[in-house]
């Protein structure tokens, strides 16, 4: 997950450009969706995607996700681990292993 150095580099980048004024939760959420669509576009005609393009678009998605978590005062590691714990309960290994069935149909 993000290191303190990564978060500080993102904060500095935004601060140097005075972009925090544009980073409302709404705008950051929109940007996540837009960048996720661009990531999906990498696979539109090529199931493997161009590795360089995939890397760049995934970085954009992650960047906006980290900026949104930071803007909301959320610890990215913490919220991911909390959600993982909830998902573990919904998808116990003994019923979900090797299956893509939704939790309510396991």
Image (cartoon, rainbow, N blue to C red):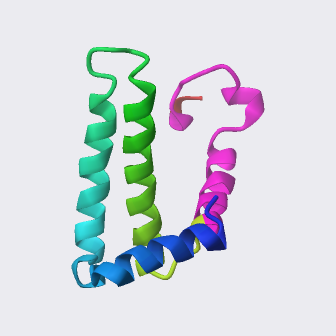
Q: Quadrant of residue 14?
A: bottom left
Horizontal side of residue 54 vs 106, given as left or right: left
Residue at image position (23%, 60%) is: 30
Q: State the residue lying farthest toward the front.
A: 16
| Residue 81 percent coordinates (x, y) | 67, 59
Residue at image position (64%, 62%) is: 82
Quadrant the C terminus occupies: top right
Q: Nearer the viewer, residue 23 or 75?
A: 23
Residue at image position (32%, 44%) is: 36
- On whether residue 60 falls in the magenta region, the answer is no
Q: Magenta stretch?
A: 77-104
Q: In the rendered image of this protein, does residue 11 appear above or below residue 47? A: below
Number of numbered markers? 0
| Residue 1 percent coordinates (x, y) | 64, 58
Horizontal side of residue 98 vs 19, given as left or right: right
- On whether residue 92 falls in the magenta region, the answer is yes
């Amino acid at each position: 997950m993000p290191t303190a150095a990564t978060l500080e580099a993102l904060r500095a980048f935004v601060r140097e450009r005075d972009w925090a004024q544009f980073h409302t939760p709404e705008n950051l959420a929109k940007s996540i969706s837009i960048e996720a669509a661009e990531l999906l576009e990498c696979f539109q005609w090529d199931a493997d995607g161009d590795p360089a393009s995939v890397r760049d678009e995934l970085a954009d998605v992650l960047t906006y996700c980290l900026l949104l978590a930071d803007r909301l005062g959320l610890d990215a590691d913490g919220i991911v681990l909390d959600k993982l714990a909830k998902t573990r309960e919904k998808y116990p290994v003994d019923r979900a292993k090797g299956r893509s069935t939704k939790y309510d149909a396991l």
